Image (cartoon, rainbow, N blue to C red):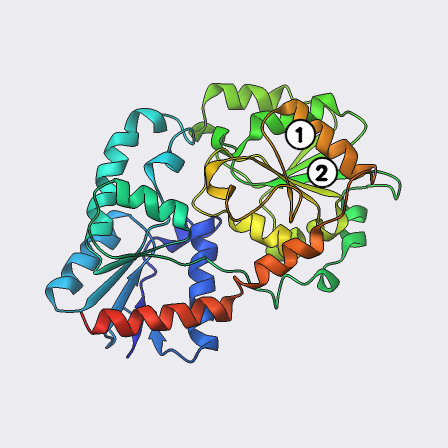
């Protein structure tokens, strides 16, 4: 058994969760001794696709005609396409049709969560769909490995200053507007948003919100994984105010780094993460501010160890074991 990890288009999305998932898949196969190749012309039994660009769809179609088994990762849904880039709401129905076509090329589909699995099933996709986490590299995301002082020195953060961070594209779905509003309500703290999006791709209201940000907000742009790991250690609170996700890899990273976390209470996280057990949840600016103040003033229970215990289940070697089972099943189809 040998697997092709098709990498067409990965460079376009290498700074996104899809790019991270692709790297996790490579490591999951490696540590579980599953033979794989990145070369399209090599010999293999199964081809695994992560992107929905035309080249991926064409390659999947060609390999399917040649009798190869196809696994398609369902990273995207219509729901998380909305409220992202300019025109995304208008094109969302067309996007849904396109991803249904792409995913339909697979003999099986893998998607990160039961939530996204149910969404894809609601589209009328009849292929087997498996819910497997994108995983987390706990060898890399170790709290003792991060250098919080290096982060604080780089951003000129004093010992007595509190820092709140978030990570993602500059898109409405990620909750950037609420992040900026919250910063305006809490001027005594520093707010840092890591990530970058070409401003030509985002709606005017997002550009205006960024332009009118308060002086306690900073946008360093896209940073390396090493620098982001330092930031998790050196900051005091991680905000993940997203409105829609298929999983949210940065949330898993923050859980692994044992930083206090506040998320928006949305359907995908209702069952897996219980408010007050592993992280805290809010639904509006008032609730986010109250929770943040309580966390930063140590008036609320520190539950970061509970979050770490949950995320351990999503460690890359566990993901690889689940992939191995799927490969065995798909070869019997």
Q: Compared to 175, does 246 lie above or below?
A: below
Q: Nearer the viewer, residue 220 or 136?
A: 136
Q: Percent x, y for residue 127?
A: 21, 54
Residue drawn at 37 percent across, 68 percent down: 323
Q: Which residue is mark 1?
A: 288
Neighbor class of circle 1 (other Cα within 10 Å; few <14, some 14-19, many 20+) is many
Q: Percent x, y for residue 308?
A: 64, 58
Q: Compared to 289, does 272 lie above or below?
A: below
> SS at mark 2?
strand
28 with respect to 291 (left or right): left
139 with respect to 25 (left or right): right
Q: Which residue is mark 2?
A: 164
43 with respect to 13 (left or right): left
Q: Percent x, y for residue 199?
A: 49, 29
Q: Say which quadrant the N terminus sits in.
A: bottom left
> SS at mark 1?
helix
């Amino acid at each position: 058994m040998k697997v092709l990890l098709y990498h067409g288009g990965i460079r376009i999305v290498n700074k996104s969760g899809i790019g991270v998932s692709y790297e996790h898949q490579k490591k999951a196969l490696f540590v579980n001794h599953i033979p794989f190749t990145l070369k399209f012309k090599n010999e293999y039994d199964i081809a695994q696709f992560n992107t929905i660009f035309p080249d991926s769809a064409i390659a999947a179609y060609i390999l399917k005609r040649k009798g190869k088994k196809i696994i398609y990762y369902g990273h995207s849904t219509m729901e998380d396409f909305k409220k992202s880039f300019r025109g995304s709401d208008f094109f969302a129905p067309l996007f849904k049709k396109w991803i249904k076509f792409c995913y339909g090329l697979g003999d099986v589909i893998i998607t990160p969560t039961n939530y996204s699995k149910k969404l894809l099933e609601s589209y009328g996709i009849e292929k087997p769909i498996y819910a497997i986490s994108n995983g987390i590299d706990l060898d890399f995301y170790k709290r003792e490995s991060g250098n919080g002082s290096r982060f604080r020195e780089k951003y000129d953060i004093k010992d007595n200053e509190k820092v709140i961070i978030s990570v993602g594209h500059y898109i409405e779905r990620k909750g950037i507007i609420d992040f900026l509003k919250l910063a305006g309500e809490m001027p005594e703290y520093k707010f840092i948003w890591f990530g970058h999006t070409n401003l030509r791709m985002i709606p005017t209201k997002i550009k205006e919100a960024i332009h009118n940000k308060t002086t306690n907000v900073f946008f360093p742009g896209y940073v390396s994984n090493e620098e982001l790991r330092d930031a998790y250690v050196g900051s005091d609170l991680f905000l993940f105010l997203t409105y829609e996700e298929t999983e949210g890899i940065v949330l898993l990273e923050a859980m692994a780094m044992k930083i206090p976390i506040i998320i928006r209470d949305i359907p995908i996280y209702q069952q897996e993460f219980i408010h007050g057990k592993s992280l805290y949840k809010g639904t509006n600016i008032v609730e986010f501010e109250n929770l943040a103040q309580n966390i930063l003033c140590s008036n609320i229970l520190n539950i970061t160890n509970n979050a770490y215990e949950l995320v351990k289940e999503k460690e890359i070697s566990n993901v690889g074991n689940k992939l191995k089972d799927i490969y065995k099943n798909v070869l019997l189809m």
